[in-house]
């Protein structure tokens, strides 16, 4: 598995672009999230046509705001070809369809949907209400051979994810987790909530402004890892 981020910022750090990544998994490229800066970044980096599947952690604008543009671009510039969005549940598929129909009108014309379980080695952890009250979010877990990669989505209650990971068979695990340096921000993981798990998991923080990183934070930030970010 190889993951590279298109952006590492949150909703209010457009200078670092919305957090999104492309994961090469089983020789396919998975776009994880499609916030409002992602479409122009994909074009600038010449990546849009290299994507095989799309995964969405949740429907906040900084994670799905340019999804319709991405779907339309492929359809019109590749002669009617469509992306496939992998969905985590029938309920979330319906939310995706309702979200897209406002912009696309005829959703089925521009996108295919397939259940996530169609792809071996990928699972979703339902984190409903753990980022925003009453709001659907998911984390993703990817397993390939003797390696596990975890993508948190937006998740304020960190223990929920790590306690789940502790129930899984032991294997080298890298966790990419949203992070905040503001203790009043309950929608994301404060860095002090992640630090106790560093002895068990390799953890990187994303979805933040790296210039606000306090000196006492020991969680490395994706924004400071050139090997984890697409250049440009």
Image (cartoon, rainbow, N blue to C red):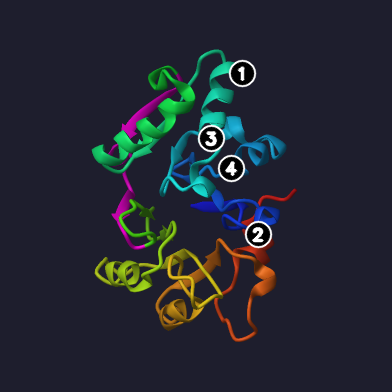
Q: Which residue is mark 4?
A: 36
State the mark number for residue 227: 2
The residue carrying mark 1 is: 77
Q: Residue at x 67, y 50 (%)?
A: 230
Q: Which mark is residue 51?
A: 3
Q: Residue furthest bottom?
A: 216
Q: CA distance from mark 1 to mark 4?
A: 20 Å
State the SS at label 3: loop
Q: CA distance from mark 1 to mark 2?
A: 30 Å
If you read the primary sequence from the N terminus, does the residue marked by circle 2 or circle 3 appear first? 3
Residue 34 located left or right of residue 147 = right
Find numbered disc 2 in the image and state the secondary structure of the residue it sits on: helix
Give the mark toward the camera: 1 or 2. Answer: 1
Q: Nearer the viewer, mark 1 or mark 3?
A: 1
Q: Position of residue 132 (x, y in %)?
A: 38, 59
The nearer-to-camera label among 3 and 4 is 4
Instruction: Characterize the local packing of mark 3: few (<14), some (14-19) or many (20 or more) Cα atoms within 10 angstroms.
Output: some
| Stretch of the chain drawn in magenta | 110-130
Residue 154, above or below 105: below
Residue 221 in the image: state x and y as whole percent: 60, 69
Going from N to C along the chain, the mark reached first, 1 or 2, is 1
- SS for dot 1: helix
């Amino acid at each position: 598995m190889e993951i590279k981020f298109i952006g590492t910022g949150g909703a209010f750090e457009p200078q670092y672009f919305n957090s999104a990544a492309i994961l090469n998994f089983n020789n396919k490229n998975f776009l994880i999230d499609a916030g409002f800066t992602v479409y122009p970044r994909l074009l600038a980096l010449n990546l849009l046509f290299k994507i095989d599947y799309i995964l969405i952690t949740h429907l906040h604008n900084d994670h799905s705001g340019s999804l319709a543009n991405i779907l339309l671009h492929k359809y019109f510039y590749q002669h009617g070809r469509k992306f496939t969005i992998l969905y985590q549940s029938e309920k979330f598929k319906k939310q995706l369809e309702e979200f897209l129909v406002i912009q696309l009108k005829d959703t089925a014309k521009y996108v295919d949907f397939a259940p996530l379980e169609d792809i071996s080695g990928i699972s979703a952890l339902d984190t409903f209400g753990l980022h925003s009250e009453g709001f659907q979010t998911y984390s993703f877990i990817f397993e390939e051979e003797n390696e596990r990669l975890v993508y948190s989505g937006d998740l304020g209650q960190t223990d929920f994810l790590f306690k789940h990971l502790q129930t899984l068979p032991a294997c080298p695990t890298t966790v990419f987790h949203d992070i905040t340096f503001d203790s009043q921000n309950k929608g994301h993981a404060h860095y002090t909530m992640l630090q106790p798990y560093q002895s068990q998991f390799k953890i990187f923080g994303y979805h933040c402004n790296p210039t606000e990183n306090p000196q006492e934070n020991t969680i490395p930030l994706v924004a400071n890892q050139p090997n984890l970010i697409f250049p440009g």
